[in-house]
Image (cartoon, rainbow, N blue to C red):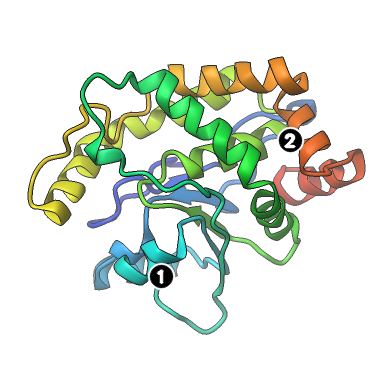
């Protein structure tokens, strides 16, 4: 199976299937996808998207981003949820070159983890529903907000931290395309050299924060999002192969 699914306009559409989790059971292929903004799709991309049979989209962007850039096309049978997990807007492309990628982005993920507890729990509730899949969750680049939610889901499926870090860092393969997209939108290249980057250090630092303050990312989910053992069992039944 292919983890990266090719589109013309989308840069970072990936299947989360195949990772080994609880009791060695693997995440189902074709059940859960992560992506950059689905509003970028052209007609050819839309046809490819429909072939995947997606039933649910979780859009993690701010409402103002959606108003400016659009959302996934409406389609019969496609449920759409806008759950804006980030509460402190900032202009990533305009950061100065002195801003270190790893510590800065990890700090932003901590902010989302602290501010977005309601929306993160709502996103997990949508994902855990048996009839929600195939499901895609996305933000603008499919990297930061999307990366945090992916890490949460994989953690609860008992996927090892090192695999979660590796999955996060796969966005590095999309960096050139993401930079091209923002350059086309702004008319000039991003100021920040870290734009579109996803070095492993970012997720490593975020997981270290979760371990320090909550025992683990699962501990964060339990204490801050109200996730219990029964919920985790449901999530595993929904997303893992028997």
Identify whether 201 is placed above or below 225. Answer: above
User: Which x, y percent locates residue 48?
Assistant: 35, 65
The one of 5 and 142 positioned closer to us in this rendering: 142
Please report the residue visible at 37 percent of the width from the left and 62 percent of the height from the top: 65
The residue that label 2 is drawn on is 156
Label 2 residue SS: helix
Quadrant, the C terminus: top right
Q: Residue furthest right?
A: 230
The residue that label 1 is drawn on is 72
Identify whether 146 is placed above or below 41. Answer: above
Identify whether 157 is placed above or below 164. Answer: below
The one of 180 and 242 positioned closer to us in this rendering: 180
Label 1 residue SS: loop
Identify whether 181 is placed above or below 228. Answer: below
Say whether residue 95 is visible.
yes
Image quadrant where residue 174 sits:
top left
């Amino acid at each position: 199976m292919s983890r990266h699914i090719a589109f013309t306009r989308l840069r970072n559409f990936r299947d989360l299937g195949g990772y080994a989790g609880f009791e060695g059971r693997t995440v189902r292929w074709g059940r859960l996808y992560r992506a950059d903004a689905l509003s970028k799709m052209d007609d050819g991309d839309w046809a490819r998207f429909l072939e995947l049979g997606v039933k649910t989209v979780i859009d993690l962007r701010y409402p103002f981003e959606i108003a400016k850039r659009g959302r996934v096309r409406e389609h019969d049978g496609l449920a759409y949820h806008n759950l804006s997990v980030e509460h402190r807007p900032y202009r990533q492309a305009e950061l100065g070159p002195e801003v270190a990628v790893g510590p800065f982005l990890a700090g932003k993920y901590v902010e989302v983890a602290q501010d977005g507890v309601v929306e993160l729990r709502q996103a997990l509730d949508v994902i855990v529903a048996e009839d929600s899949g195939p499901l895609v969750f996305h933000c603008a680049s499919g990297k930061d907000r999307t990366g945090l939610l992916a890490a949460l889901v994989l953690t609860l499926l008992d996927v090892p931290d090192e695999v979660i870090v590796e999955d996060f860092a796969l966005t590095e393969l999309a960096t050139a395309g993401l930079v091209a997209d923002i350059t086309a939108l702004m008319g000039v290249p991003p100021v920040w050299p870290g734009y579109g980057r996803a070095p492993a250090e970012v997720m490593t630092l975020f997981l270290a924060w979760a371990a320090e303050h909550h025992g683990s990312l699962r501990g964060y989910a339990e204490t801050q999002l109200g996730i219990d053992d029964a919920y985790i069992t449901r999530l595993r039944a929904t997303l893992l192969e028997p």
